[in-house]
Amino acid sequence: MAFRKVAERKDVRPGTGKAVEVGGRTIALWNVGGTFHAIDDECTHVGGPLSEGELDGTTVRCPWHGAEFDVTTGKVLCPPAGTSLACYKVQIVGEDVQIDVP
Ligand code: FES
């Protein structure tokens, strides 16, 4: 495990998400009121891109069929997805956003 820079703070406005590539995987990086969170980008239903979903508080809605996940934990909140997502530690160093990836 090692923290790697994936973005700068200004790259992800509060209330939005962004897909980043790191460690051979696509991770959705979220800014919830200035606090950053990272979960897998691929919906556990059939692979919708969660970073393109709508964020409401700490809940993202999959743009394909509407499953909901908590972006702070990766936990599935609403079907049709039935499995939670991996969640990654995030740290801020200066203006850099870093994710702890396997
Ligand atoms: S792919 Fe996300 S709800 Fe179907």
Image (cartoon, rainbow, N blue to C red):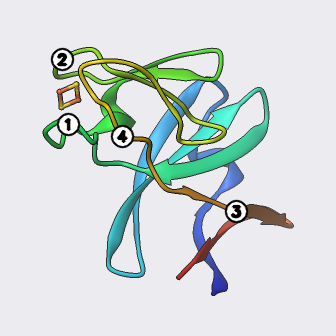
Residue sitting nearer the eye, 89 or 35: 89
Q: Is mark 1 within 8 Å of ligand 1?
A: yes
Q: Circle 4 is placed at which residue position?
A: 83
Residue 56 to residue 86: above or below: above
The 10 Å Cα crowd at callout 3, few under 14, some 14 to 19, many 20 or more, is some
- Residue found farthest to the front: 82
Tell me what residue is drawn at x 28 percent, y 29 percent: 81
The amino acid type of the residue labelled 2 equals His
- The reply to whether callout 2 and callout 1 are in contact (CB within 8 Å) is yes
Residue sitting nearer the eye, 80 or 89: 80
Kindly indicate the quadrant of the structure image that contains residue 98.
Answer: bottom right
Residue 16 percent location from the top left of the image: 53, 29
Q: Circle 3 is placed at which residue position?
A: 89
Residue 29 to residue 68: above or below: below
Disc 4 versus disc 2: distance between alpha carbons?
15 Å
Q: Secondary structure at mark 3?
A: loop
Residue 16 to residue 73: above or below: above
- Residue found farthest to the bottom: 1
The 10 Å Cα crowd at callout 1, few under 14, some 14 to 19, many 20 or more, is some
Closer to the N terminus: mark 1 or mark 4?
A: 1
Q: Nearer the viewer, mark 4 or mark 2?
A: 4
Residue 35 percent location from the top left of the image: 78, 40
Q: Which mark, by number, is residue 88?
A: none
Q: Is mark 2 within 8 Å of ligand 1?
A: yes
The amino acid type of the residue labelled 1 equals Gly
Q: Circle 2 is placed at which residue position?
A: 65
Residue 34 to residue 79: above or below: below
Closer to the N terminus: mark 2 or mark 3?
A: 2
Closer to the N terminus: mark 2 or mark 1?
A: 1
